[in-house]
Amino acid sequence: MSPILRVGVLASGRGSNLQALLDAGTRLDYPARVVVVVSDREDARALERATAAGVTALFLNPKDHGARTAYEAVLTKTLERHDVGLVCLAGFMRLLTPVFVRVWQGRLMNIHPSLLPAFPGLHAQRQALDHGVTVAGATVHFVDEGVDTGPIVLQAAVPVQATDTEETLAARILVEEHRIYPEAVRLFAEGRLHVAGRKVSIR
C-alpha cells in the first residue's frame, strides 16, 4: 500500500472546500490526509473546522513578517515542518509571489469557481452572469505564477439558469467544487497526474 499523502491547506475564510478534503480523508480508501491548516486570518472558520477534525490549525499573521516573501518563507517552513507533499489553496485570499510558487511548483493546487480560462480572479460567478453564459462551473488547477492560469486538472460544468443570482449560482457550483477537489487530490496522491506544458493527463 502506498504511503498516505500529507496535505497542507491554506485558507482565509469559511473553509467549505477544506471541509470536503477533511471529510474525504476520513475514508479508509482515500490516499491523502490534511495534516495542517494555515490561515492569514485569526477568525477564519477554516481554523475551527481543522480543530474540530483534530488537525493542526495555525494562524500566521502577515503583519508579523513585513514583506510578502518573508511571510511566505514562514509559510514554507511551517508546511515543511509538517512534511507536506501537496499544498491546497482553499479560499486563500493572498496573492502568492513567484518565489513561493516556484518552491511548491507541481505540488500546489487551487480550486476556482469558473470553467477556466474563463472568468479568472474575483467574483467569477458575477462575471459569468454579466457575460450571459449558459454554462458555468468549477476548475481544479495547478498554481503557476499567473492568476488562475495554471494547468487544469479537473473541471465540472454547471448549467446557468435564467433565474440565477450570484448567490444561487455560487451555491450550485460549490457542490461541484466539493466533489472535484478531493478527486484531484486523490489522483495526485496516486501518482496519476502528468503535466506536460499546459496539459495535465490522467494515467
Image (cartoon, helix red, strand yellow):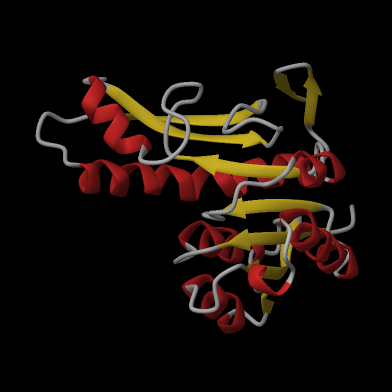
Q: Point out residue 11 in the picture as x, y percentages from the top left corner.
A: 57, 62
Q: In which quarter of the image is residue 27?
A: bottom right
Q: Nearer the viewer, residue 126 or 65?
A: 65
Q: In the displayed structure, does residue 58 sit left or right of residue 195?
A: left
Residue 52 lies, with reference to residue 189, above or below; the image says below
Identify the image quadrant of residue 35.
bottom right
At horizontal 78% and vertical 51% (from top left) the residue drawn is: 86
**Does 17 sit above or below residue 63?**
above
Question: Measuring 53% from the left and 70% from the top, which residue is drawn there?
Answer: 46
Question: Does residue 159 appear in this view?
Answer: no
Which residue appears at 59% of the width and 59% of the height? 21
Residue in front for this viewpoint, 70 or 30: 70
Q: Which x, y percent locates residue 182?
A: 60, 49
State which quarter of the image contains the N terminus: bottom right
- Whole-percent x and y of residue 8? 73, 61
Residue extending farthest to the front is: 66
How many numbered discs sit on the rendered protein? 0
Measured as percent of width and height from the top left, residue 5 is found at: 81, 56
Taking 34 as reference, is 88 above or below it? Answer: above
Which residue is at 88% across, 63% downward?
Answer: 80
Q: Point out the residue furthest to the left here.
A: 163
Q: In this view, does 54 lie to the left or right of 3?
A: left
Q: Quadrant of the C terminus?
A: top right
Residue 113 seen in the current view? yes
Rendering quarter of residue 77:
bottom right
